[in-house]
Image (spheres, rainbow, N blue to C red):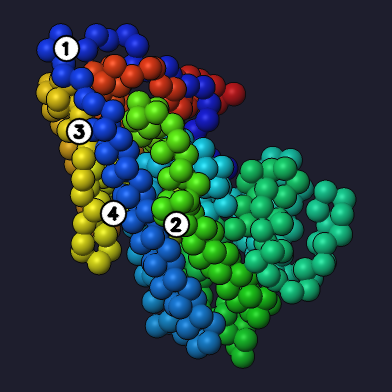
């Protein structure tokens, strides 16, 4: 799945901190790390709450298929992504999150693994499971073995994740659900998202065939998403493995974890794999939410999540806030100019991704911005990429200001060696 794990940058050792830097105590550092864990607990808890709302909307669609229930479940999916995307700043530095993340947010996917596709569909090169079509077939052959798919369950689709050892075989998570709700977006870089008819779930007047099995797959995928989020939310509670891993390490190592996550999401993952690659290829299939045309929100809330971690403040979906000692505060004590620079760079990133979000909400979606010859669209996207790169360099300076050991930031060929993308 797309994670931007191509190369890495070693940051933090080249610059000298200000001679007037004030060293924070271990207790101060530990308080910042604890607040970070508290924010993670709240954000994953909100993601679970929103996923349960999506689960209820899925059940309503299945019980009474119609334009209203289809619109409602799509809206619930979009809403569910808002808190989840803000958790992505906890990836990379926290191994428990990065090892788990592919279960819920893997992309892009060979949709022919799951359901019917247009005759023009071409799966990933060499992917034997790209036309498996679980929904249409009660018996499946995977890696030479026969699988009984008579009943579609969470366990079945979980077993098909990365079938044949191919990352494009995404059977679970937000994007599998997205495909089941919107269907393929066949508009290329033109206007329009996927437009799966609600009758694909109407067993009395079924379109697309196998409406009962499609409903079973949608329910299984949503139930599994809820279970996976419940598991991760528990890892950040008192005594949870994610929180324990931070408390068991040194305060400096905890700060490095935080900054590794910020830098890697900012640079290799978001600027590189999720944004620059699609622009280089002018390919809407590289759009993060390619079925729903929700990419503008996903990118924006990734940036919000990074700001949450740096500022030490997260606003929950109920309007309350988790607020406490922050990286920003530590950096400001060590070198006020560096802290001001990080905050300024993050503000630029939020503004540039906010401009893309506003453009999409005004009617020109992200895949249209990727169109060859769309100079205005490319300019919007490049401004966001440049902002994220500069933000990463500011994070590098923060590592140095705090006198931490160098941290490894995930890279991306799209940024580091663009010619390799076309080989």
Which residue: 27% across, 39% down? 31
C-alpha distance separating marks 3 and 2 = 25 Å
Q: Which mark is residue 360?
A: 4
Q: Nearer the viewer, residue 203 or 402?
A: 402
Residue 328 bears which disc, if any? 3
In contact (CB < 8 Å): disc 1 and disc 2 = no
Separation of marks 3 and 4 at Cα, in angstroms: 31 Å
Q: Dot 1 corresponds to which residue? A: 18
Residue at x 52%, y 43% (from the top left corner): 96
Q: In the image, is 218 to the left or to the right of 314?
A: right
Residue 153 pos. (x, y %): 68, 70
Left or right placement of residue 154 versus residue 227 in this view: right
Mark 2 Cα-neighbour bin, 10 Å: few <14, some 14–19, many ≥20: many
Q: Disc 4 and disc 2: Cα gap in Å?
A: 31 Å
Depth check: 142 or 243 in front? 243
Decide which of tag 1 and tag 2 comes sooner along the chain.
1
* Residue 295 visible in this rendered orientation of the protein: no
Residue behind mark 2 = 233
Query: Closer to the camera: disc 1 or disc 4?
Result: 1
Element type where label 4 sits in the image: helix
Q: Quadrant of residue 27?
A: top left
Task: Give how far apart the Cα atoms at labels 1 and 2 are.
Answer: 39 Å
Q: CA distance from mark 1 to mark 4?
A: 42 Å
In the image, residue 144 above or below residue 276: below
Sequence-first tag of 3 and 2:
2
């Amino acid at each position: 799945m797309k994670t931007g794990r191509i190369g890495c940058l070693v940051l933090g050792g080249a610059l000298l901190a200000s001679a007037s830097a004030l060293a924070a105590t271990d207790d101060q550092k530990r308080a910042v790390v604890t607040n970070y864990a508290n924010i993670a607990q709240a954000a994953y808890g909100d993601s679970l709450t929103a996923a349960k709302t999506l689960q209820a909307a899925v059940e309503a669609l299945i019980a009474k298929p119609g334009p209203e229930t289809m619109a409602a479940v799509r809206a619930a999916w979009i809403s569910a992504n808002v808190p989840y995307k803000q958790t992505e700043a906890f990836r990379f530095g926290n191994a428990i999150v990065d090892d788990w993340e592919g279960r819920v947010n893997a992309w892009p996917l060979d949709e022919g693994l799951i359901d019917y596709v247009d005759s023009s569909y071409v799966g990933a090169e060499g992917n034997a499971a790209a036309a498996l079509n679980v929904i249409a077939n009660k018996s499946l052959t995977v890696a030479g073995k026969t699988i009984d798919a008579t009943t579609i369950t969470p366990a079945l689709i979980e077993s098909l994740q990365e079938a044949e050892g191919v990352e494009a075989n995404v059977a679970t998570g937000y994007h599998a659900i997205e495909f089941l709700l919107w269907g393929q977006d066949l508009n290329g870089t033109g206007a329009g998202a996927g437009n799966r008819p609600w009758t694909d779930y109407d067993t009395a007047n079924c379109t697309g065939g196998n409406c009962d099995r499609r409903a079973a797959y949608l329910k299984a995928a949503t139930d599994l998403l809820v279970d996976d989020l419940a598991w991760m939310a528990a890892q950040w509670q008192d005594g949870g493995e994610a929180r324990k891993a931070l408390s068991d390490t040194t305060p400096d190592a905890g700060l490095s974890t935080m900054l590794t996550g910020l830098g890697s999401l900012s640079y290799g993952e978001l600027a590189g794999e999720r944004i620059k690659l699609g622009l280089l290829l002018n390919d809407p299939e590289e759009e993060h939410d390619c079925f729903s045309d929700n990419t503008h929100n996903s990118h924006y809330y990734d940036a919000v999540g990074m700001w949450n971690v740096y500022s030490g403040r997260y606003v929950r979906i109920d309007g309350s806030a988790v607020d406490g000692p922050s990286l920003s505060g530590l950096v400001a004590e060590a070198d006020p100019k560096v802290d001001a620079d990080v905050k300024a760079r993050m503000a630029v990133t939020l503004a540039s991704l906010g401009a893309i979000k506003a453009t999409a909400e005004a009617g020109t979606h992200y895949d249209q911005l990727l169109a060859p010859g769309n100079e205005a669209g490319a300019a919007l996207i490049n401004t966001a990429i440049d902002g994220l790169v500069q933000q990463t360099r500011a994070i590098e300076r923060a590592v140095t200001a705090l006198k931490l050991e160098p941290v490894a930031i995930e890279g991306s060929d799209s940024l580091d060696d663009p010619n390799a993308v076309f080989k």
